[in-house]
Amino acid sequence: MVTELEYKENFFAGTRQDLLDRIETQLKPKRFKHVQRVEATAIELARENGVDVEKASIAGLTHDYAKQRPDEDFIQAIHDYRLNPGLLDYGNAIWHGVVGAELVKRELGITDEDILNAIRHHTTGAVYMTPLEQIVYMADYIEPARDFPGVEEARQITHHDLATGVAFQAKHTLAYLVDKDKPVYPKSIDTYNAWVPEHPGI
Ligand SMILES: [Fe+2]
Ligand SMILES: [Fe+2]
């Protein structure tokens, strides 16, 4: 059970309960529950793929840490931390991952780059993703409360082969954005190009 997981590796200076308490102050109850489901799914995928379970727990819990911050906080952070000014053209959907990781680093003291990259890339994916990054990207997509046409297939594919799951999400998310005439962040197209042609027919 997730609640019995003890943090022993010092990726976060405190217990899992301490981390939960910090995150709970940042999120509405509904999203707080979502991040706990993402954590549970990420731990499952970590066990299946031989990935560090503690990292999966921390990355799962913190991936949406900044989701409910006001735009001003992100704009300030882009300036303060000298992030790519091109980020200013986007909004919360992109910021809460890429900029959110910087807030997790500064406010929660989590400095492990694998965990931070998992947060950075959870919305758009990336050309290169470590197994942990793939796990958080997929856990966010298939956690038990997700309900969209194809989610069951996404779950099966992901538990069978993590990288094929990544390709499935990259393809279906891009198709969805195009169908709805929504803007596509260029990095999502890079993710599509890196993952989908290698996994044809998904
Ligand atoms: Fe998110
Ligand atoms: Fe999420």
Image: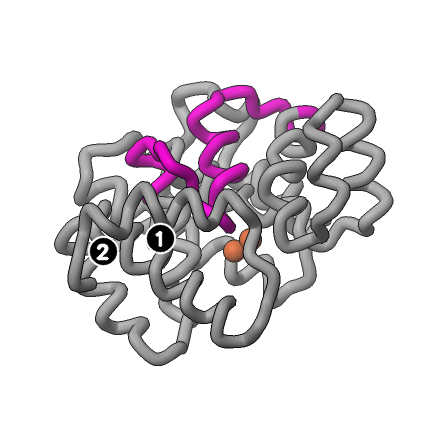
In the image, taking residue 46 as reference, residue 109 lies left or right, namely right
Q: Residues within 10 Å of mark 1 (few under 14, many from 20)?
A: many
Pinpoint residue 17: horizontal percent, then vertical percent. 54, 41
Q: Determine the residue located farthest toward the bottom in the rendered image.
A: 149
The reply to whether residue 154 is visible in this rendering is: yes
According to the picture, the residue beneath numbered tag 2 turns out to be 158
Judge by depth and name the residue closer to the eye, 138 or 6: 138
Please name the amino acid that badge 1 sits on: Met
The reply to whether residue 3 is visible in this rendering is: no
Per the image, label 2 sits on a secondary structure element best described as helix
Does the beta carbon at disc 1 come under 8 Å from ligand 2? no
In the image, taking residue 88 as reference, residue 198 lies left or right, namely left
Pinpoint residue 42: horizontal percent, then vertical percent. 35, 47
Pinpoint residue 9: horizontal percent, then vertical percent. 40, 20
In primary-sequence order, the first of circles 2 and 1 is 1
According to the picture, the residue beneath numbered tag 1 turns out to be 138
Residue at image x 13%, y 55%?
160
Numbered badge on residue 31: none
Q: Quadrant of residue 31?
A: bottom right
Q: Quadrant of residue 55?
A: top left
Pinpoint residue 118: horizontal percent, then vertical percent. 45, 37
Up/down of 109 relative to 85, above or below: above
Which corner quadrant holds the C terminus?
Answer: bottom left
The stretch of residues the image draws in magenta is: 106-134
